[in-house]
Image (tube, helix red, strand yellow):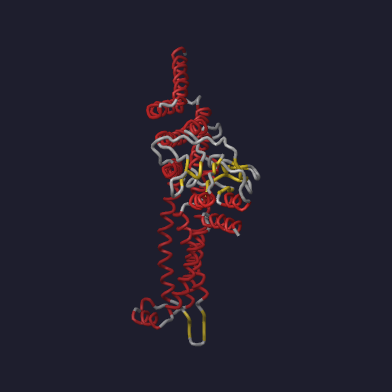
Amino acid sequence: MEAIIKWFRVRYRSIVNSIAFLPAIIASLFLVLSWLMIAFDFSNAGKNIKSQLHWLSLKDATTARSIISSIVAGIISLTVFSFSMVMIVLNQAASQMSNRILDKLIGNRSQQWLLGFYIGTIVYALFLLSAIRDIDSGIYVPALSTYLLITLTIIDIFLFIYFLHYITTSVKYETIIGRIFKQTKESLEKSCNQKKFIPREPTTEQGVRITAKTSGIFQGFQQEKLLKLCEEENLLISFIYAEGTFILNGSPFAVVLHAKNISTETGDKIAFLTYIEDSEKIESNFYYGFRQLKEVAVKALSPGINDPGTAILSLHALADLLAFRSCNYPESGIGDSKDRVRILVNEKSFDQLFVEYFLPIWDYGRNDRSIRQEVRLILVQLRMQTKNQLVSNLLQEVEALESDAITLKRDY
């Protein structure tokens, strides 16, 4: 049963984050709207409105069909063009920056609402077209519904103009990097809420190892339910790896400390309450945001792209995040309702973040003068805030290269 619930949870998250989810919901609402409008059109209230407002009457079925058919053809063209622009933007972002940022563009709700409105208008028009019939008692023409369709078409035209503006601004590198930075900063603030560093307790004690049931990326755990389980079973669980770590099927990912054995059911519950999935999300794993910014900068500095400006934008975002992390710390132990530590988590230190996400950019861009100057300015400010030895060592290396470059220029 628990496996089924977990399967449904993963599938639900995949469907909700899909680019087609919101447009499908909106199209369904437009289908309901068309049915309600046609029913209202031929109700007594609708007939009274059309009899009092003669300009709303539409008695020619051929004219109604022509209007609806033209609208359907036009909106389909707008939809195809809009989807084509989205695909071009996605392809450009993947080739110029990183394919891991595509979820930022695919999951954007604004464009999903817009595309959903287009598709909904088409669904509304097609259903309305099927409602126009010639019967013995006369022509069955839903005039009110047709005029509403015309109004929706006018709205679609203005939405298309907005879409052109939106798609040209959303593809800008500073917009994409800014969106990644914002999500990462929010996740970082949620996780690193301690102003004082509390060292993690050593976990060299023997215990029962909990192994992964499937291969995937460690994405955290259900905190409330796992705390409740630990309190009921009197357990102390220590997670071996930090979030974002790939774990092989059958490999241990956690240890139940001070325990010689636990029941199979308890071990399965711990594994079930732990997220080991195929994909990553910044909301639950801020390391993923760090990695995306690093990848964007490294790819921008590659010979094929050669875009130091984009790399500098990523450096700015990374520096801001590192500066925040240097003064704020994650919880090393999570306690239950009685403030007794039940879960020990493994978080990366500032040094690990600096080595893993900042140094690769320096390795790729050390020969670029603009990158050297920007890195030096960033490191000077980071050293003032962190007093970190790694930052100081890299700053000395950067200044030495800058000095050699100035000497070489003078000799030349």
Query: Which of the 4 quarters of the picture holds residue 210?
Result: top right
Q: Pick the residue in front: 250 or 403.
A: 250
Give the image location of residue 400, x and y in percent. 46, 18
Is residue 321 something one can see in this rendering?
yes
Q: Is residue 264 left or right of residue 19?
A: right
The spot of residue 191 in percent (x, y) is: 44, 43
Quarter of the image that includes the N terminus: bottom right
| 412 up-or-down from 249: above or below | above
Q: Residue furthest left?
A: 52
Q: Residue furthest bottom?
A: 137
In this rendering, the answer to whether 170 lies above or below 141 is above
Which of the two residues, 409 or 77, is positioned nearer the viewer here?
409
Q: Would residue 172 be seen by someone viewing this image from the given angle?
A: no
**Quadrant of residue 198 in the image?**
top left
Q: Position of residue 118 (x, y in %)?
A: 47, 61
* Nearer-the-camera pick, 403 or 333: 333
* Image position, residue 349 (x, y; %): 48, 34
Q: Could you tell me which residue is drawn at 41 percent across and 41 percent down?
A: 193
Q: Residue furthest top?
A: 411
The total number of labels drawn is 0
